[in-house]
Amino acid sequence: MIDNPVRRTLAEGGVALGTMVTEFATSAVTRLAASAGADFVLFDLEHTGYGIDRMRHVLAAARGVDTVPFLRVPDSAYDLVARALDIGAAGVMVPHVDSGDEARGIASAARYPPLGTRGFGMLFRDDWSPDGVAATIEHVNSQVLTLVQIETAAGLAAVDEIAAVDGIDILWIGHFDLTASLGIPGDFASDAYGDALDAVLAAGSRHGKPVGMVCSSVDEGRDLLARGFRLLAYSLDIFLYEEAVRAGLTALRK
């Protein structure tokens, strides 16, 4: 049976650091991230051309390393949430969550009865408990992580209600969409954006839900950790690749 080390780290009050993949969703990328020390890899289905068939193979390969695979689905529909977990994700992220009712639907879709409504369809034998179906369900329910994105003015207004939902594990800020929704697109130095971060962090603290987001640099990440964030995805694969190649080529040309 597979445990979720990110869940354990967060339960113990620790910090989980990983990265996000939007372009290089291959069978090797999670192993590379694991070698680099990533606690998790967040794969994206919201803004990419990838589909479930492609991600099924990528997530199956990820089960061979300790780095935890998360999958962001396009919306909160039951079949997207449940299927993401069926094909091997250890956690599912849902964008644009705007209400407690939507959060409750996500939490239910992500867990088997009696905690939720997820249909039982175990594709991986290493998920099974030798003690039978009931023990298997209990263990899988205890290990899954649900991450909901607060990235609209409506979601921000409802963040306390969202954070209070049993079965919602992590609040994740979508900073570009949030600033756009607040009428300050890309203005991360504004007071309104800072107040929004504080509101999400406060809701997370009240309800015992860690808060995470993507950081684009080490300095930004350090600032976010100091502020109270407990999950950070260090940049995106496309940016990391471009920056690494540019740095090498620039050095050679000198």
Image: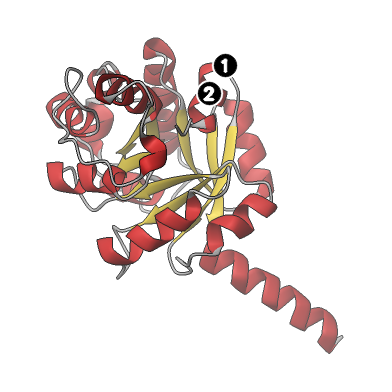
156 and 97: which is toward the camera: 97
Residue furthest to the right: 254
Circles 1, 2 touching at the beta carbon (< 8 Å): yes
Residue furthest to the top: 206
Is 251 left or right of 216, judged from the image as shown?
A: right
Residue furthest to the bottom: 253
Q: Position of residue 243 (x, y in %)?
A: 65, 70
Q: Position of residue 95 (x, y in %)?
A: 27, 45
Where residue 81 sits, quadrant-wise, is: top left
Q: Residue at x 57, y 25 (%)?
A: 9
Give me the disc on residue 12. Answer: 1
Q: Secondary structure at mark 2?
A: helix
Is 139 left or right of 11, judged from the image as shown?
A: left
- Indicate the quadrant containing the N terminus: top left, top right, bottom left or bottom right: top left
Q: Secondary structure at mark 1?
A: loop
Q: Position of residue 153 (x, y in %)?
A: 24, 37
85 and 10: which is toward the camera: 85
Residue 51 makes an appearance in the image:
no
- Indicate the quadrant containing the C terminus: top left, top right, bottom left or bottom right: bottom right
Badge 2 crowding class, 10 Å Cα cut-off, few under 14, some 14 to 19, many 20 or more, is: few
Q: Residue at x 33, y 44 (%)?
A: 178
Residue 142 makes an appearance in the image:
yes
Question: Does residue 136 sit above or below 92 in this rendering?
Answer: above
1 and 144: which is toward the camera: 1
Question: Does residue 187 sit above or below 22 in this rendering?
Answer: above
Task: Kindly report the distance in space between the C-alpha atoms of the residues bearing marks 1 and 2.
Answer: 6 Å
Give me the disc on residue 94. Answer: none
Where residue 172 sits, quadrant-wise, is: top left
**Which amino acid, by three-letter code, is at mark 1?**
Glu
- State the residue position of label 2: 8
Question: Does residue 240 sit above or below 206 in this rendering?
Answer: below
Badge 1 crowding class, 10 Å Cα cut-off, few under 14, some 14 to 19, many 20 or more, is: few
